[in-house]
Amino acid sequence: MSPVPRTARRLGLASVVLLASFYLTTQRPEKRFDPLRDQLESPIAADRAWAVFRLAHSAGGSSEALRRLLPMLSDQDALVRSRVAEGLSHFRADAELVVIRLDPAVHDQSPTVREAAVLAVGRLAPAGHACALLRDALRDPEPKVRDQAASSVAACR
């Protein structure tokens, strides 16, 4: 039996990839492979944090991305909450809603989360009650949070 030429093998592999891609795109959405969703639901906090970062920075402020990110502000891990807070600063079209939802993060027990939330609120100011949150953050016990609030409160003037 003669060996299969390399070109024929490549064409065979290409057709398998094409068929698999066609199959995946014609399935109902709940059956499609969604690696980002899997990472957002991962038991590993670093995976969730990375997925949040990717979603927030690549979604272009879509309402679907916002819908997926907002519940993650209450994640048990501070790294994930801080990534969500920072990522929400990219949703300017929904700035008032985002500022309202960031209010608890500005008062979070973790200084890292508070700093990220103040950064996000500062980027969205003067939307909603952003300026009031920033003024509250000026009295935060953590110097990094106060510094971030001081540099962000300028947007309120």
Image: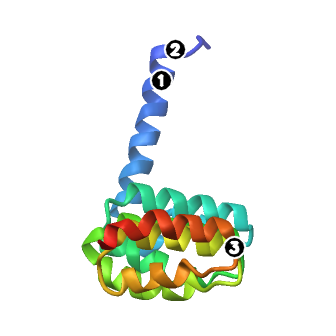
Left-right relation of 106 to 133: right
- Pick whichever, 28 or 82, lies toward us: 82
Labels 1 and 2 touching (C-beta < 8 A): yes
Give the numbered dot on residue 142: 3
The residue identified by callout 2 is 6
Verify CB contact (< 8 Å) between mark 3 and mark 2: no
- The quadrant of the image that shows the N terminus is top right
Residue found 45% across the figure and 69% down from its top: 120
Q: Position of residue 84 (x, y in %)?
A: 53, 70
- Numbered mark located on residue 60 in the image: none
Quadrant in the rendering for residue 46: bottom right
Name the front one of labels 3 and 1. 3
Q: Distance between the Cα atoms at labels 1 and 2?
A: 6 Å
SS at mark 1 in the image: helix
Q: What residue do we see at 41% from left, 86% from top?
A: 132
Residue 15 in sight = yes
